[in-house]
Amino acid sequence: MFNKAKNAIWLIIDGCHAETFKNLYRSGNLPNLRRAMGDALFVEQAASVFPSVTLVCLSSLATGCWPRTHGIVNNVWLDRSLEPFGGRAYLSELDQTLACFDRKLYGLPTGLLPDLNTGGMLNNDIDPETKTIFEVLGEAGLTSYAVFNYVGRGATIWRRPGRGDMAHYAEIDKRSHNYSRWDRLMIDAAMKLTVKNGLPNLLNLYFGGHDGQSHHRGVGAQSDYLRRVVDLQMGRLFNQLQKKYKLTDLYMIVSADHGQTGFPRAGAHRPLWTGQIVPMLRDTGPGVVVDGGEKSEIDPSANVAFAIGNGAALFIYIKNRETGSWRHAPRMEEDILPVAHAVLRAADPACADRPSYIGPFLDALLVRPAPDQPYAVYTGPAQDGAAGGFITTLERFAFARDRYPDAPALIAGIEHAHRGPDIVAILDYDRGGWYFSDSDHLGNHGSFTIEDIAVPLAFSGPDIAPGSLPSARIIDIAPTIASMFEREMPSADGEALDIFSA
């Protein structure tokens, strides 16, 4: 019989660099976390999913599933089963950002930022067959609070940012860049909740400001932010909880959704944006209409569409030009390969005289021959009509494990039947320094390079001995938390880690 008296606190530190966190913790520079967790059980190599971006990874953390299972394949995705063709742009279209927290900009009864009362766009977009950890615990009569997390489906209390909180964030993101203020607001909300209602079985805390700070100031600033903000804010919460609870009786989980890579690389910033992408794809051939970017509504006349949504991989969707329908899979020779060649030409110095030439930005070009087939790496020459070929992702990345430690599995993780793109252009991101952005960033993420997918992961609590486990994925975290309460997550792709006998 499961124990309803157990309590767990799960921190998700957005964009946290794995080695930075581990070094700080082990050297005693996170004293408040240390007093709650002691020596802790660390996973030495914990890996995120691809693309390594916030809403994809938060969905994988909550469900224990690959993106192909829960359906959130990018921060911006298109779905060829939709009519009209389109999709989501969660963090780039204001109405969708607000809708993720179940709000809209104007309306009754509050005027500004009223509730939509729909449950939250991201929550609703996650496949209903995949259960969140909050739903699994709720079915067992256990309680959970999700604080400031975009994913709160099934939580006893989904504590979204309030109207005042969101007004603060607009000022932070656009003007002051004081992201520590956002994470303090989150802990304020958690403290008020636990004073009013007590500590739930699972308290999930999402430090979203950490990622904003890293984009703005780079990976090198994380050490200061973790000490000055994350650890001190947790100290405030722990001081309150110690009035009623013994900290060592609590289960603690510290994780991140994804990692972070510092820029510039190779001596310069090399951001790419729509002004370069559209001409590249228009070079496919006569009559091609291109649309896309960080938006969800696509021009009905377009026959090539793209979704950015992350810093390191361009998702390209292609219409079947014979039928004129997005619902029909594109043809390889007539529809897909001309687009593939256009991308190759834009990255080939031999084509530098073409208006569409960008520079040597491309590291690999992934092509899915059909929606029910896996991605392969296209190795064809740049010119249309020339003979090309395919190799498997295992062949392409077999000797690059130091740079791409888990590439084949991570690529397979986006093979969703309707939302997975036909082509994925992988940038020369960590070495060449190319990334997708409309401005220079000091920190970025989205790739399956080691720095982007490596995340901190630590556990502590009753019967969890200090030590280490060799490896895990973020899709293993929710099943592991479920196991703390003697529960299982049958819909998860991940597995519970053996944290009690490590």
Image (cartoon, rainbow, N blue to C red):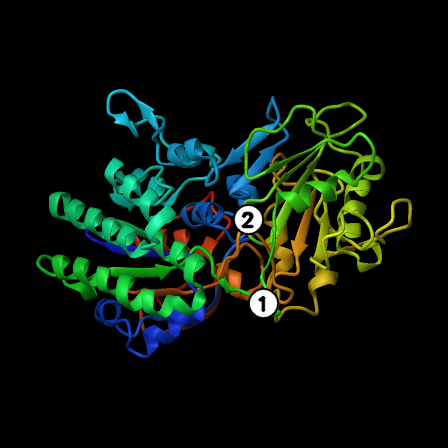
Does any portion of residue 91 appear in the rendered image?
Answer: yes
Which residue is at a point 62% across and 34% down the rendered structure image? Answer: 418
Question: Disc 2 to disc 1, how far (Cα)?
Answer: 17 Å
Closest to the observer, 415 or 136: 415
Count the marks: how many? Answer: 2
Which residue is at a point 12% across and 48% down the rendered structure image? Answer: 195
Residue denoted by label 1: 265
Which residue is at a point 26% across and 72% down the rendered structure image? Answer: 38
Above/below status of 266 relative to 122: below
- Quadrant, the C terminus: bottom left
Residue 162 image offset from top left, x and y in percent:
25, 38
Residue 312 image offset from top left, x and y in percent:
59, 54
Horizontally, residue 359 falls left or right of residue 406, namely right
Name the mark on residue 370.
Answer: none
Name the mark on residue 438.
Answer: 2
Q: Secondary structure at mark 2?
A: loop
Q: Nearer the viewer, mark 2 or mark 1?
A: 2
Q: Amino acid at mark 2?
A: Asp
Residue 245 image offset from top left, x and y in percent:
13, 59
Closest to the observer, 201 or 176: 176
Q: Secondary structure at mark 1?
A: loop
The image quarter containing residue 233 is bottom left
Horizontally, residue 425 falls left or right of residue 353, namely left
The image quarter containing residue 18 is bottom left
Q: Residue furthest left?
A: 243
Residue 461 image offset from top left, x and y in percent:
26, 64
